Image (cartoon, rainbow, N blue to C red):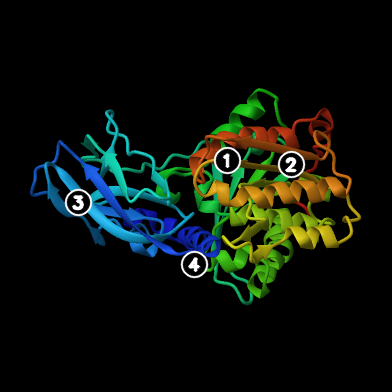
Amino acid sequence: MPSALCQARLVIPFICWLLLVSVALASPVAITLQLHAPSLPEDSVVYVAGSTSGLGNWKPDEKRMEYAGDHRWIYELNANSGTTIEYKYTLGSWAREGADATGKPLPNFSHTVDGVSVVKDQIASWTNGSQPRFVGQVTGAVNYHRQIEYDGLRPRDVVVWLPPDYENTTFRYPVLYMHDGQNLFDPKTSAFGVDWQIDEICTRLIGERAIAPLIVVGIYNTPDRTKEYLPGEKGSAYRNFIVNTVKPMIDQTYRTDASRDGTLVGGSSAGGLCAFMLAWEHSAVFSKAICMSPAFKLENDEKKLKFDYVSTVADSARPNHSLTFYIDDGGVGLEKLLQPGVDAMLAALRGKGYEAGRDLFYVRDENARHEEAAWAERFPAAITNLLSTTADREAIRFTDGPNQ
């Protein structure tokens, strides 16, 4: 990936981990990717880059394709049956990748490995690399807190988005803490150049009085993302980092509603699980959680359990403090691997007395993939369900400055 997207590499390990977990005991299948690119000269050098090591882990110039005549290029790899691979075609860099008729980069190609041995794709246009692919754009005011440290963790940046008119009020605002902070506001820093557009979405919803004004805190990930977002020693350290370092820093610096009712947490994929764990295990701190495409539970093809937070919830008592959960997922590619865990967690929560439409909200988009663009599309539903009541608006407190 291009250097401007170095943060994108931080999300790849978890995607690869999902693939490995789901197919640990499956047999490899030989696949040939065949690209028809009629606009390319026959001597063009074409590469494929994708979500597994066999596809170069998204490096745009590592897996070179072989010319097969008639403007067709092929690449052979082995993948386990049931695996979903995602990939793109490039001419050696992310400045030159497959594009649609308008010149916009194509979305990921996707294939679930089954009995098909040859996968045929076609690309008619390519990005020309004449302009930067990713242009930074942030709506509203953001502040950056650089290289925040915590014992046992790598330092990371924290970005804070402030609601409209923050500087002209004396209100205290609820706060949403989000994982993968580099992906929230700015396409220049986001994985694959697609951000969640949380700045634009919140600005619009606040202007429409659909949600209470809020502060959004984006906590950047690191190369240890997978270990930090999942259960384990480093995961516990990361969650303690948010509770004991990030939240106190934000409450001391900004006019926040520091109460649990004014404190939300959210994330996607492994970050969706991490958001759930923070709320479940720290219900005295957080009152609401956004869990988008969460990895609650994963099994391999022979149903040998590899990861399961559902049983943790089912075997534990319901937290003493009230919690509200928004959970969603898609239906394409990697989302299919996560669906059984989502279904099981919804059942476990209902067994604990959580009720749909009251303190449990679930959305499924059958056509959505496991990617930032899909999470951006569903984010309005997530934040509106959790922060849209009159009571939330009236809960904003007046103050003369930050919390002491």
Secondary structure under the numbered disc 1 in the rendered image: strand
Q: Which residue is mark 4?
A: 223
How far apart are the alpha carbons under marks 1 and 3? 31 Å
Nearer the observer, 92 or 340: 340
Image side of residue 403 versus residue 322, left or right: left
| Neighbour tally class for label 1: few under 14, some 14-19, many 20 plus, Cα within 10 Å | many
Quadrant assignment, res 315: bottom right
Sequence-wise, the earlier of marks 2 and 3 is 3
Question: What x and y, as percent, mark residue 324?
Answer: 80, 44
Q: Which residue is mark 2?
A: 173
Q: Quadrant of the C terminus?
A: bottom right
For the residues bearing labels 1 and 3, Cβ distance under 8 angstroms: no
Sequence-wise, the earlier of marks 1 and 2 is 2
Q: Residue at x 76, y 44 (%)?
A: 325
User: Mark 1 is on which residue type?
Assistant: Gly
Q: Quadrant of the N terminus?
A: bottom left
For the residues bearing labels 2 and 3, Cβ distance under 8 angstroms: no
| Neighbour tally class for label 4: few under 14, some 14-19, many 20 plus, Cα within 10 Å | some
Q: Which residue is mark 1?
A: 330
Q: In front of the other: label 1 or label 2?
A: 1
Sequence-wise, the earlier of marks 4 and 3 is 3
Question: What x and y, as percent, mark residue 336?
Answer: 56, 47
Nearer the observer, 329 or 252: 329
